[in-house]
Amino acid sequence: MSAVVRGLASVAVVALLASASASSAAPDALPRSTTDRADDAKGPQVHALYVLPSDGVDRALDTNGTIAASFANWQRWVRAQTFNNGVRLDMFRGELDVTFVRLGKTDAQLSARGLSLWEALEDELRAKGLVRPGKVYAAYYDGSSAVACGGAAWPPKVAGAVAALYLRSTFGPGSTCYEPERSRAGLQIMDLAILREVFHAMGYVPSCAPNDTGDGHVSDSPRDLMYAGDEPWRPAALDVGNDDYFHAHILGCREFAESTYLDRGFGASTAKLTVSVAGPGRVVSTPRGIACTKRCSATFERGMRVALRAVPAKGARFAGWTGACRGAKSCRVTLDRARSVNARFRR
């Protein structure tokens, strides 16, 4: 086994040793699509995939908000590390674009590829015409592997565009690598594991980095997102010491601070909130901006937490929220990106 795949396989050893407690509602999810929808923005970006083997059980992770929540979790983590920048994501009308793919091979056939499972996934995705130049594909593969929790390309040494998380893989005493409900509740370590694979597929860590292990990882701290070594992986920082791949600025060495995949606040420091109202009532916001009885939108500072209040008309009652808020209780929306909320009233 090469050093690069040893590092990828090591994710399994620590997959569920820790999870952050930050709680957040699951982001909106678009209806299922088997194609890559029109992009909101141009340029290199990361596209989400929900991939099943031919005999895999469909858990609807693309439409129930799980994958959108996982992306939001690790994107929030990246923004905290990069002065509110992030990774440019493939969005469609303000929501994460996730493509659903059912492959032609069974889970057993694919798992037999061992450490090259991600390559088997990429081969099938390319055969279906789903891999485009200028994109990295974060594949949430709802299948198993006997050797790892994830794997990815590492260009230019290992060509490819797929970064994969193997959701049904197990480690230790049969613990599952990825538990979907944890992402819906907040950041879990496997959200950072798929981010780690995404960074590999973007070409990090470059071989010219001072602490490179020779296989796309660094050796200086187990707190580094890209660490591989003898100590347990405890990801807490993007490039510890800023000396390898983020703000290291080593001449001729790939640098994430200058990457075309870096999203500098989506080109703006604001985010749009759209509210749709059905039935006799209105919705108002704190701070001010939203006040409508049909459909309206307002732009707020990115990252702001906006409270929405449902006001039924005389003789009517509030029936509940859908979209970025759910249920009939209070609605508070964190605008880390464009969000939409629906309010329903009944007589």
Image (tube, helix red, strand yellow):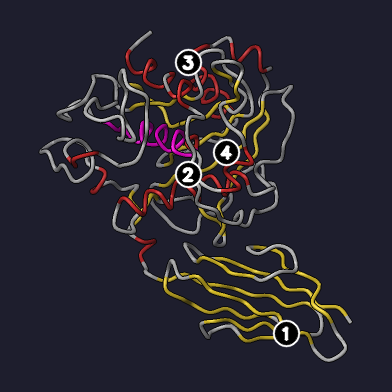
Which residue is located at x 45 percent, y 70 percent? 304
- Of pointers 2 and 3, the one earlier in the residue sequence: 2
Q: Which of the numbered marks, if any, corresponds to residue 254? A: none
User: Alpha carbon of mark 1 to alpha carbon of mark 2: how far?
Assistant: 35 Å
Q: Which mark is nearer the camera, 3 or 1?
A: 1
Q: Quadrant of the N terminus?
A: top left
Which disc number belongs to residue 311? 1
299 vs 251, left or right, is right
The answer to which of marks 1 and 2 sits earlier in the sequence is 2
Kindly identify the residue that appears in the image at 53 percent across and 19 percent down: 120
The answer to whether 322 appears left or right of 16 in the picture is right
Q: How far apart are the two marked residues, 2 and 4, measured between alpha carbons? A: 24 Å
The residues tagged by marks 2 and 3 sit, at their Cα atoms, a distance apart of: 30 Å
Q: Residues within 10 Å of mark 3 (few under 14, many from 20)?
A: some
Amino acid type at image mark 3 = Ser
How packed mark 2 is, by other alpha carbons closer than 10 Å (few <14, some 14-19, many 20 or more), is few
What stretch of residues is rendered in magenta?
A: 191-205
Q: CA distance from mark 4 to mark 1?
A: 39 Å
203 is higher (above) or lower (below) than 318: above
Front residue (pair 243, 135): 243
The kind of residue on which mark 2 rests is Ala
Q: N-terminal of the two: label 3 or label 1?
A: 3
- The quarter holding residue 50 reads top right
Q: Identify the residue under disc 3.
A: 116
Which numbered tag is attached to residue 49?
4
Q: Nearer the viewer, mark 4 or mark 1?
A: 1
Q: Which mark is residue 20?
A: 2
**Circle 4: residue type:** Leu
